[in-house]
Amino acid sequence: MAITGTDINHAANLLRTGQLVSIPTETVYGLAANAYLEEAVVSIFEAKQRPAFDPLIVHTHSIQEFEKIAVNIPNRAYQLAEAFMPGPVTFILPRNPIIPLLVTSGNESVGIRIPNHPLTLSLLRQLDFPLAAPSANPFGYVSPTTAQHVAQQLGDRIPYILDGGPCQIGIESTIINLVNNEVEILRLGGLAIEEIETIIGQRVKFVKTSSSNPKAPGMLSSHYAPRKKVVLGDISKNIKQFDPHRTGILSFQKVWQQVPREQQYILAPSGDTSEAARNLFAALRQLDSLPIDIILAEQVPETGLGKAINDRLIRASF
Ligand code: TXA
Ligand code: MG
């Protein structure tokens, strides 16, 4: 069983010997290993039961380290990094051959991110290698936003969970493709597109992934999904069709009289989409653990992190 604690030195020693450690970030918890060490990276895929076609993001502590991960880095990457890193964003850049192809699922590009969490930043500074880390959940399930979430699902497969408290953003990083002078969003996430547009002074498009567009492998339509069926739509209409005692509700602000209160999770009493993002994955997990048959959810307003939340809700409902 994994030990949970705040011992950075212990975490560093495990990682130096090729073992896995779950790390806190401001977005979600990651499952980390030495990105330069193929055997260590293999064990990430095994622990998560993740298909080999889904590439991992490489985490580092500063912009000065980028060249140990990527090559031909455009100025725009540095401009955006100055503005948003450390923070909830990942850049796709040309891969430095020192990064094993296993990390990038055979792609000549690599994902780079500087997570904004004090424990993980000090851990990264102690290491002389970057960390490959996907979200620390079994493949396809909801991402973990507390150390307890990680322990519940992967506790028997990893030696240590670095406990950095609940994640402050709560949804995964925004992924920007910067290869070949492009600027396009491959995954909506914790950094709103509008903020990126302010820095580069132009509109940025979100490229939806499909099997015909393999730019962001791993962006499957069914993902972030609890085991229970999620029905996304107008709760006032959908609520009439199900037995209220066997129904859970994931609501943005409102409490519904028809359903027992303990089967309802209000994402953002304040109406703030950042608060909703912070609560989203814990809410899905909690509703998933109740003796109910169905979860009725509704989309949130598309301001701030709203688009990224709705993207997760749509995937959860597939
Ligand atoms: O917030 C986050 O990004 C979290 C924390 C732990 O850093 N990590 C995370 O990793 O969400 P993961 O593995 O669950 O999602 C990584 C996704 C892949 O599914 C893929 O869509 C994209 O990042 N990705 C990674 N490398 C890529 C590459 N070279 N080209 C295109 N997409 C890539
Ligand atoms: Mg993930």
Image (tube, rainbow, N blue to C red):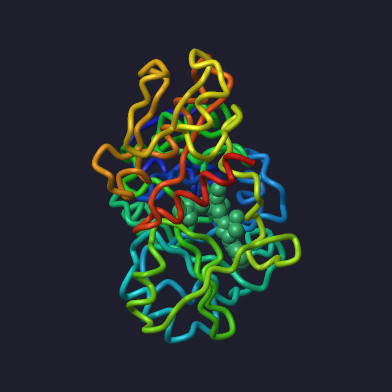
Residue sitting nearer the eye, 245 or 101 = 245
- In this rendering, the answer to whether 59 lies above or below 292 is below
Q: How many labels does the image show?
A: 0
Q: Find the residue positioned furthest to the left.
A: 270
- In this rendering, the answer to whether 290 lies above or below 182 is above
- Among the 4 quarters of the image, the one containing residue 261: top left
Q: Find the residue positioned furthest to the right.
A: 212
Q: In which quarter of the image is ligand 1?
A: bottom right
Residue 91 image offset from top left, x and y in percent: 49, 69
Query: What's the residue at 54%, 39% (across, down)?
Result: 232
Residue 225 image offset from top left, x and y in percent: 58, 38
- Tell me if 37 is positioned left or right of 4 in this view: right
Residue 206 image offset from top left, x and y in percent: 53, 68
- In this rendering, the answer to whether 34 lies above or below 139 is below
Quadrant of the frame with the C terminus: top right
- Residue 36 in view of the camera: no
Query: What's the residue at 63%, 58% (across, down)?
Result: 55
- Residue 52 in view of the camera: yes
Query: What's the residue at 40%, 53% (across, down)?
Result: 306
- Among the 4 quarters of the image, the one containing residue 49: top right
Residue sitting nearer the eye, 5 or 253 = 253
